Image (tube, rainbow, N blue to C red):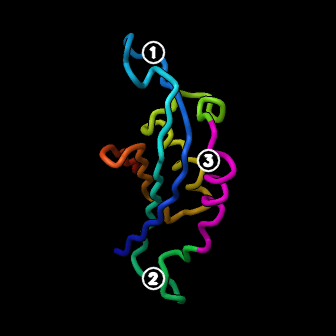
Amino acid sequence: MFTISKEFHFSASHQLFGLSDGHPCGRLHGHNYVIRVFLRAESPNVEGFVQDYNDLKPISDWVKDVLDHRNLNDVFGFQTSVEIMSKYIYDTFKPQFPLLFAIEMSETSKTNCRYEA
C-alpha cells in the first residue's frame, strides 16, 4: 500500500462556545493551522503517482479562498474545533478524491487531530 500526504497552511481566528468560564478557547483567538490530506492506493498509477499533487489544487484553492485570514465562526455553522473541522473537510473532499482516507488538522505544533473514515 502506498500513502501520500500534502500539507496546506492557513491562519485564522475562532472562538469555541459552551466551555467553562475562563477557558482560553472561549475567547476569540487565532492559530496558524496545518491541514494534511492523506491518499492511499495499492499501487501507483501509470504515471507513477498515487495522485498527482497538482490535482489537489482544489483543496489548496479552498483553503486559501475560504479559510485563510478568516474568522472560522463566520465560515462554518458548527463548533470550530479541529475535530469537527477535520471531519467536515474529509466529507467535503472525499467525493472528488476517492483515494482520500484521512485528514489531519493541527492548530499548534503540539496538538493534532486525525479523522479517518
Task: First in sequence, mark 2 or 1: give its number.
Answer: 1
Identified at 42% across, 43% down, the residue is 107
Residue kind at label 3, given as amino acid type: Asp
Instruction: Reply yes or no: does residue 66 show up in magenta.
Output: yes
Counting from the top left corner in percent of width and height, residue 30 is at 50, 36
Q: What is the span of residues highlighted in magenta in the rendered image?
A: 54-70
Residue identifier under label 1: 18
Q: Residues within 10 Å of mark 1 (few under 14, many from 20)?
A: few
**Which residue is at the far right?**
65
Nearer the observer, 2 or 84: 84
Q: Say if the magenta span includes residue 14.
A: no
Query: Which residue, given by chain and number where applicable, does mark 3 sit on?
Result: 68
> Secondary structure of the magenta portion, mostly?
helix
Vertical placement of residue 7 versus 103, above or below? below
Quarter of the figure with the N terminus: bottom left
Q: Residues within 10 Å of mark 3 (few under 14, many from 20)?
A: some
The residue drawn where x is 47% and y is 59% is 37
Tell me how far mark 3 sits from mark 2, CA to CA: 32 Å
Residue 44 numbered mark, or none: 2
Distance Cα–Cα, label 3 vs label 1: 25 Å
- Which circle, 3 or 1, is nearer the viewer? 3
Circle 3 SS class: loop
Q: Nearer the viewer, residue 31 or 115?
A: 31
